[in-house]
Amino acid sequence: MKKLMVLALCILLVMSLVPVLAETADGAGGQQNGGKIIVLATGGTIAGVGEAGKTAGYIPGALTADELLFAVPQLAEVAPIEAIQICNVNSDDITDEIWLTLANKINELAADPDVKGFVITHGTDTMEETAYFLNLTVKTDKPVVLTGSMRPATSISADGPMNLYEAVCVAASDEAVGKGVLIVFSDRIFAARSVTKTSTYNVMAISAGEMGAIGVVRDNVVFLYESPSKKHTTETEFDIAGLSALPKVSILYFSVGADPELLRFAAERADGLVIAGAGAGEFSKEWVEVINGLSIPVVISSRIDDGVITRDNLLCGNTVAANNLSPQKAAILLQLALTGNVGQEYLERLFLQY
Ligand code: ASP
């Protein structure tokens, strides 16, 4: 009997300490000091439905935002949540229009003092692109966090609910304020500029190559270790408020024997090009000849994941180095640059600053 009472007292003591621990660990517990989290749902595998238990052959973007939230009742302990369905698509069907809607919506809602942060549920295929676009266009210090999943909601051990829970904890944390747009995936926190998808199937599909993760989440406790140093969110010069579309930029991938006519074809129907070159942004003499003759802006990136391209690496004088941006992110920066005052010097500055 005595033993039972001691045990009961111990349990009561531990339970009374839990909220204190959650709030004090590195200053970033899940239960935060007020403010709601807006969940903007766009679709993807996290909202995917398929044959019970299976991980492949499902329909992405089948569950609604409310259904995603219903699966994680623990979210109610983190913050009040409001859900908005922006679209419900496979992320390969994300468009410029959806990007503009998302950025404008966040800019509008961020002005509300009751809003603490934002979580965007998104397919993993193009999550990094949406993250970088928002990193350059939302004008708020409030956390904006993207997440998704590799396994559909109907699979065994679906990873969506935990990713959503951790993303909301990060969005509700004071530590994430002013860090730019983030991706939370498989317990890790990544900055929008360096994050990329690195696996077609594995639950650890999101990574950041040699730049690494900038933090981790353990249940509702958030640890952020680094801050992005390139300009983002409130520091950017891009204003998308009045835009209904973005300039068109195409990416051309170089490989042995790649047809240089593709460059001419693409240049005729785009406002700018990005080249995914080999090594430090290189390509054949045939490509050099065609690129030298192009009159639209051409940015040189690499088909290699890690590493930087500098001005000295460039084979053509009329091109701009993408720094260490991937081709898909260089294309977004070029799209935004093309909404403004384009010129070689202006582009060179942007690719150094962003
Ligand atoms: N095809 C899916 C998408 O990007 C993949 C995923 O979400 O993991 O929407």
Image (cartoon, rainbow, N blue to C red):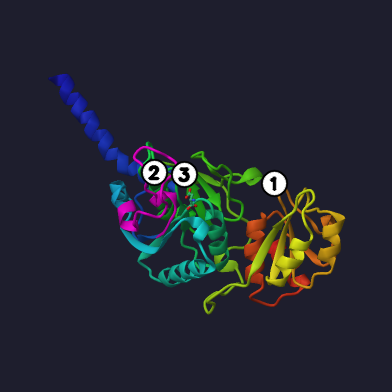
- How crowded pointer 3 is (Cα within 10 Å; few <14, some 14-19, many 20+) is rated as many
Residue hosting label 1: 306
Tag in front: 3 or 2: 3
> Which residue is drawn at the image coordinates 61% and 52% (left, top)?
194
Residue 15, visible in the rendered structure: yes
In 3D space, how far apart are the residues under numbered discs 3 and 1 (Cα atoms)? 23 Å
Residue furthest to the left: 1
Which numbered dot is residue 150?
3
Q: What x and y, as percent, mark residue 258? A: 77, 53
Instruction: Pick the quarter of the image with the N terminus.
Output: top left
Q: Few, some or many C-alpha atoms within 10 Å of disc 2 (few <14, some 14-19, many ≥20)? A: some
Query: Taking 124 as reference, is 267 above or below it?
Result: below
Question: Does mark 3's beta carbon lie closer than 8 Å to ligand 1?
Answer: yes
Inspect the image, locate mark 1, and give the three-letter code of the amino acid beneath it: Asp
Q: Would residue 57 appear left or right of 318 to someone viewing this image?
A: left
Q: Is mark 1 on a helix, strand or loop?
A: loop
**Label 3 amino acid?**
Met
**Quarter occupied by residue 155:** top left
Q: What residue type is labelled 2?
A: Met
Which element is circle 2 on?
Answer: helix
Graded by Cα atoms within 10 Å as few (under 14), some (14 to 19) or many (20 or more), the crowding at tag 1 reads some
Q: Where is residue 2 in the image (x, y as percent from the top left)?
A: 14, 20
Majority secondary structure in the magenta region: loop
Disc sitting over residue 162 in the figure: 2
Report the Cα–Cα distance between label 3 and label 2.
12 Å
Whether residue 349 appears in this view of the structure is: no
The magenta-colored residue range is 41-68
Q: Earlier in the sequence, mark 2 or mark 1?
A: 2
- Residue at the image point whose x is 81% and y is 64% from the top: 291
Image location (x, y in percent) of residue 328: 63, 57
Q: In terms of depth relative to the viewer, which is nearer, 316 or 241?
A: 316
